Image: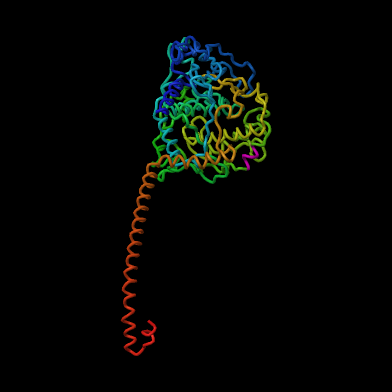
Amino acid sequence: MKTLFWSAILLQLFKTCWSQFPRPCANSEGLRTKECCPVWSGDGSPCGALSGRGFCADVLVSDEPNGPQYPHSGIDDRERWPLAFFNRTCRCAGNYGGFNCGECKFGYWGSNCAEYRESVRRNIMTMSTTEQQKFISYLNLAKNTINPDYVISTGTRAEMGENGESPMFSDINTYDLFVWIHYYVSRDTFLGGPGNVWRDIDFAHESAAFLPWHRVYLLHWEHEIRKITGDFNFTIPYWDWRDAQSCEVCTDNLMGGRNALNPNLISPASVFSSWKVICTQPEEYNNQEALCNATAEGPLLRNPGNHDPNRVPRIPSTADVEFTINLPEYETGPMDRFANNSFRNVLEGFASPETGMAVQGQSTMHNALHVFMNGSMSSVQGSANDPIFLLHHAFIDSIFERWLRTHQPPRSIYPRANAPIGHNDGYYMVPFLPLYRNGDYLLSNKVLGYEYAYLLDPGQRFVQEFLTPYLEQAMQIWQWLLGAGILGAFIAALLAAVIVFARRKWRRNQKRKRAPSFGERQPLLQSSSEEGSSSYQTTL
């Protein structure tokens, strides 16, 4: 009863949302006023101001210059995010968070957000079968649950009218919400006219924000799964793919095996075989000058290992990871995919994990896994359609964490200016609301309330990776264990009774045998005397 009570409290606390377009702001009024300061239901005031949780404030964006990779200005809604849509949002105090300050910052819990809690992300291969199946069922629930708090934009801000008279927003399920976010942050810029786009732009890839952006992205995803399931202990697992020879998670018990009839599809024995993908046709969107509207576009595709071996000769090794972690510089040179000896560029997969030098025509590290999957996951804009994306990026995030712990860099190493658009320190991450600056997330995951099982000390790691799965399995079958114990005790008692009974019977039989044998000695002696052996009779 106590557990249910606290679950209800937490569910109410997390009822608001974290990112993209909050429903209270996705309307003509919000677009016209350019204000997104929703009321917190806890006290009925915008941003929970009456309770001291936050207040509505002007958005101040960074004016630091961007790099030369994007030469345009004023034609993309993501420029100077979020000013194309809103110039006033909630600014939360202390440990409060959420778009209306009705939630807590990452890592904090409780009605006053005063409780710090550290969750542990675990290796999916060491989780119990029950935990693995629970993770899969949670993903499927997210795929089939319309998100109550978020909507997506199906048109550009210009298409919605100068005063927002034609808002273009749409419902979306929780899983696809994050697929759409990943598409939106990496899509091409429309320059006007069918197919006329600028491709060398990405607000979450190919530069410094790659790791901080995906860190926040996974935290939001984790948060939304907790909200729709009510399981506030949920964490995204990771797949440690170092030195793997194949896709170890591509089984029907995990992320789906290969379809025997069509190697590009998922086995029908997996729930993922019924999933439909979205946002996988960028050329069509470019030709139509339209955003992805989250319409289903076909089945999830995956054919691991049947890729171009010249582009990806193998899955990254332990040695590759160690070389990458030992690179001291976070970002170098042009701060894009051509950067040499950049930890970020090597880990992202545009440079060699053997020399540190940028390479063309090959994909390494993070990129190598995407290409290796040879399907929906191999296209940047639609890659999050494949749930392996989560496992893969959780492990990439853990490598980022290892680098941070190894080098303990100061905030000043993050580029303040001249990085490609969207990647400077002070740039707000597209398309999150509330707002997060890139440089603020160049910090340890412990500050954000989570840890990785394989980075724990040996004692804690044993508990997380070995003891915990065993205990979880035992908890699932405790009724059977209890029944087996009772039955075993009954059988043992029955056997003991049989043994006691048999021994007593044996003893009685032994006594009966001794009595006749003693009485038979006299006739034998007599027989002997009759035969002239008087010695025995005389002696007696």
Q: Is residue 153 visible?
A: no
Residue visible at 46% across and 32% down in the picture: 385
**Quadrant of residue 61 within the rendered picture:** top right
Tell me residue 49's x, y (percent). 50, 11
Tell me residue 538's x, y (percent). 37, 85
Quadrant showing the N terminus: top left
In the foreground, 214 or 535: 535
In the foreground, 403 or 480: 480
Instruction: Residue 74: say if magenta.
Output: no
In the foreground, 222 or 242: 222
Q: Is residue 419 visible?
A: yes
Tell me residue 184's x, y (percent). 50, 24
Residue visible at 40% across and 31% down in the picture: 141
Q: Is residue 515 above or below residue 225?
A: below
Q: Is residue 263 above or below residue 406?
A: below
Residue visible at 47% across and 19% down in the picture: 21
Count of numbered tags: 0
Farthest residue toward the bottom? 532
Tell me residue 24's x, y (percent). 44, 15
Quadrant showing the C terminus: bottom left
Name the chief secondary structure element in magenta: helix
Instruction: Residue 322: say if magenta.
Output: yes
Q: Which residues are magenta?
A: 319-324
- Report whether 406 appears left or right of 287: right
